[in-house]
Image (cartoon, rainbow, N blue to C red):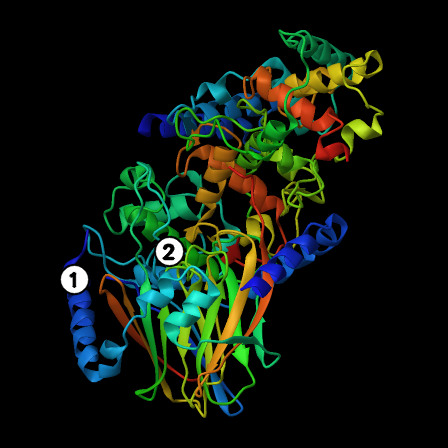
Amino acid sequence: MKMQTKLGATLTAALVVAGCASLPSTSELNSLTDAIVKASFRSEGPVGVDRVLNIDETSRACSEADVSGKPLDEKTAKDIEAMNLKTIRWPANGQFLGNWKEGEKIAQSGRGLTWTDPPGTVSGGNCYNCHQIDAKEISYGTIGPSLHNYGKIRGVTDPNSPEAKPIVEYTWGKIWNSKAYNACSNMPRAGHMGILNEQQIRDIVALLLDPRSPVNK
Amino acid sequence: MADPMRIRAQASGDKATVRVLMSHEMESGQRKDANGKIVPAWFIQEVTALHNEKTVMTAEWGPAVAKNPFLQFAIKGAKAGDKVTILWKDNKGDSRKDEATVS
Amino acid sequence: MQTRRETLKHSAVVAGLLASTGLFPQFAHAAFNKNAFDAKSVQDALKAIGPATLTESKDVTITGPDIAENGAVVPLGASTTLANVKQLLILVEKNPSTLVAMFNMSDSIEPTVSTRAKMGQSSDVYAVAITADGKALFAKKEVKVTLGGCGG
Amino acid sequence: MKQLMAWVVLASGLAALPALAQKTASQGIDEYRAMLQDGNPADLFEAKGEDLWKVKRGPKNASLEKCDLGKGPGVVKGAFVELPRFFADTQKVQDLESRLLTCMTTLQGFNAEEIAKTPFGKGEQNSVTALATWISAESKDMRFNLPQNHASEKTFYEVGKRLFYQRGGPHDFSCASCHGEEGKRIRLQDLPMLTKNPGDGVGFAAWPAYRVSNGQMWGMQQRLNDCYRQQRFPYPGFGSDATIALGVYLGVNAKGAASVAPAIKR
């Protein structure tokens, strides 16, 4: 604890002296931030400090773009999307749709992967935090677009039909790794990062695309 | 030992409005602890309000009153300078008595 | 860690409390109506308190939000324009125990009280006024409890 | 009884009408919040905090009345809306809570490191929260105006900005995921946009606050800690430079916003 604090303070002091009248350079500020992150966060229960120390290329590039206030250039964005697209694991048994009722429960749940979740907690999808889904749930967020009538709007009457295939695959892929379609999307990469398993994703796809799901009523 | 209450008593017209905040867990008896054991109910059970040392209202509460309880009522004929006293007693026998002057 | 000063202060308060129990004997006498607070319905709670019949009345008002952002704290109030009100009750129908609070009124009190209740789920909430001649009159409204925050 | 049941069915039927329910949901929540304003249990903590400031405590049996919160020893009014700031005696940028630890150590002889390690809601952490509640209340309605004169204060603003946008954890969440755009909500909770002044009594200008959901009083340190928890980040140390840099970023952005702390929150 003490050592960490000292490390941060020393770095700050060094940079302050170096910078004097003007601010430290961008790269100096970036490395100071890294040092402060390293000194400030600690592992707690199952949550390891690697979660902020080993950030992948996608998140790092997007964070930097956010700080600069300029979006990623088109080429970098495309490269990141291509890289993420490669990570998508398609359903092993070829089944994209599960049980929409289970999907609704997963969409409702915001549990899992925090330092206060008891070991063995099944993670939820956090979906309603950001999206409208079943219109009966009035407590929904607006960070993401409304998914009410998701399948209906896209004309999906039979999710197993060849016509529905592109949208079924996109839906699976978007949930598995959202960054494959939008490099700096706010949406988590539920499959890629191991938040949800294959069956949970199947159930959410069903919630969105099954014509019997209340989402499409 | 419980922390003091916050009592505000304000006269307006022919009455004084009294607002009380009490510091209490108000444990419902429904909640489970980390080991899955029910946390026993612990709550304020009786409240007494006095105006210049005369009882004007008593109350019985269950564990469904919210944590750090709030209570509002109005005493007829109370004027600035009068004394309002509130007492509470919980189901473990702990109690508290605080006073305020009507402003 | 308690300092000596704090310990002294606490003892003084305890002494004051002991004295107060003697000063205000009515406080010790108020008997807690356990049956009423154990009741699982509005009717059963009323039965435990006394009145046999319960009638809806425009002379009684229940105040509360239409929607509560959190069930842990729901502001509820009971009031009436009736004279001779002996008791005012606040109840939440779908709580594990229905009765939340019971206020024993006197002539020196306006027949209007408010407090805050915990609610486990969306439910009808009731204000009941019991008059000196044993009539129980009520008003009710629905309070919707939402799931707030990130649901975690 | 049958009659009662019938009403329940009718009432839930009404609530199921989505258009109607949706239209009234946010108005309903506003009404709910307004009803809670009168009688904020933060008052209980405020009273305790004032007492803790004045009472002689700790190994040195001293009060905090000579504590310098940035406007000179013992000056409380107005201190809150200028924190975090640089302190010459510690050569550090400090927020209200870390500054209180300094005063509790130098004046009263407490062990700051031990308090920083104590979980929220336990032991001396409760004293820090109560003190922060009272100190914030002494600046109620004043406008945020954090100093940005010292090089460290400027540097911390820039670091805070980087932390605000830092994506991480299994969900790739950053502070900006929820607080980077205007007019968004999570579930039914409105999310203030924190990259600029979000308005009087919103965001940075609303903490410490009493949380009705758990009946706890939270200072800014606990607010940030719980944001990080829900972001699925690891645990930020109490008073760590990351939390303080973030505080500088949020506080400077909130320039001109009137403080309503201690507030009452969901």
Q: Is residue B34 left or right of residue B9?
A: left
Count of numbered circles on the image: 2
Taking C10 as reference, is C27 above or below it?
A: below
Disc number for residue D226: none
Three-letter amino acid code of the residue under disc 2: Leu
Distance from disc 1 to disc 2, alpha carbons, whole Å, reads: 21 Å
Secondary element at tag 1: helix
The quadrant of the image that shows the N terminus of chain A is top left
Secondary element at tag 2: helix
The quadrant of the image that shows the C terminus of chain A is top right
Three-letter amino acid code of the residue under disc 1: Thr
On the image, numbered disc 2 is attached to which residue? Answer: D131
Query: Neighbour class for label 2 at 10 Å: few (<14), some, many (≥20)?
Result: many
On the image, the x and y values in percent for residue D13 come to 68, 53
The residue closer to the viewer here, D227 or A146, is A146
On the image, the x and y values in percent for residue D40 come to 48, 63
**Identity of the residue drawn at 35% across and 50% down:** D128
Residue B62 visible at all: no
Query: Neighbour class for label 1 at 10 Å: few (<14), some, many (≥20)?
Result: few
On the image, numbered disc 1 is attached to which residue? Answer: C7
Taking D117 as reference, is C33 above or below it?
A: below
The residue closer to the viewer here, D22 or A24, is D22
